Image: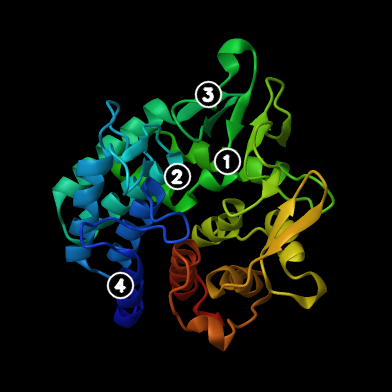
Amino acid sequence: MPAPVWAAWRQAFLDPSGRVVDTANGGISHSEGQGYGLLLAVYAQDRASFDQIWTFTFTELLIRDDGLPAWKWVPNRTPHVADINNATDGDLLIAWALAEAGDLWHDPRYLDAARQMARAIWKVDVRAFDGRNILVPGATGFDHTATGGGIVINPSYWVFEAFEKLALIEPSLDWKSLEASGLDLIQRARFGSFQLTSDWVSISSEGELSPAKGFEPLFGYNSLRIPLYLLAAGHADRERLRPIFQAWTRNGGDRPLIVDVDTSTIVAELSEPGYRIQTALLACALNDRPIPSDLRQFQPTSYFASTLHLLAMTTIARRYPQCL
């Protein structure tokens, strides 16, 4: 990652305490953001920033009894942890970043922390259900099997590259089974005329998929990460990615859409460069289309869009350099 790009992201979103700030969400921090920050610091080979982010994560979020971080930290509140529940995507991102850091800087402490978190993920976040291993989004609130119900999942929580790395440091756990379940669920979770998943999906006790009750039926900000996670891990199956690409490029456009999958209506078109580069990444992977020149530049906007921008740029450089 170019040093000026990383410096711009760091200046915009990294507090001196090591807290990654979600600027569009009331200035809170969360395990997802800490995980992304750790991963980007590895890509930038910036050990000082990595240690800064990890110290905050360890001291402020790793306060649960099961070895996983609480997901939400609020600055203007005491105590700062507003919700002790974990978030599986944050768990995976942090464990993955620790494993990468351990290899990059030859530090067994990072690797040990990654292994411990990997084991905790399997104990807390993985369920055997419907004949497969699947990820629940957090320790509580998503598994209703005890009362005869199903399980709620979030397809964007399958961080496929994390499985590959964690399998190298903790091979006793069946990460391949998680990869397989994620690929299958993303293929099958298609709703409405756009044939898109919702951010939150219910798997019934019979294995049927539907938009989860109690959540907005949106293909939203969570789900727009799905192509990035698939392509970063080399899963470029055209049929799996086709509905998203068709939705985002309808009428010649390049803006990712927020879609209500119940009514098949477009709720929003996302214009920030960090979102539009997700469409460009798909066009590159599926059609060898060069990345537009304006999207090769980085200027921070909101936390989430800017972070996805850097992750997409990294994926393109590693997987699809012909598009640059």
Q: CA distance from mark 3 to mark 2?
A: 18 Å
**Residue shown at the point (27%, 26%) measured from the top left:** 65
Element marked by disc 1: loop
> Pointer 2: what residue?
89
Question: Tags 1 and 4 in contact by the CB under 8 Å rule?
Answer: no
Query: Nearer the viewer's eye, disc 3 or disc 4?
Result: 4
Q: Amino acid at mark 2?
A: Asp
Marks 2 and 4, the one that precedes in the sequence: 4
Marks 3 and 1, the one that precedes in the sequence: 3
Element marked by disc 2: helix
> In the image, is residue 162 above or below residue 47?
above
> Pointer 1: what residue?
154
Q: CA distance from mark 2 to mark 4?
A: 24 Å
> Pointer 3: what residue?
128
Query: As drawn, is 66 to the left or to the right of 286?
Result: left
Q: CA distance from mark 1 to mark 2?
A: 9 Å
* Number of the label disc, if any, that sits on residue 38: none
In this view, the residue farthest toward the bottom is 293
> Which quadrant of the view contains residue 270?
bottom right
Q: Amino acid at mark 3?
A: Ala
Marks 1 and 2, the one that precedes in the sequence: 2
* Number of the label disc, if any, that sits on residue 11: 4
Q: CA distance from mark 1 to mark 4?
A: 31 Å
> In the image, is residue 2 above or below residue 132?
below
Across and down, in percent, residue 249 comes to 74, 70
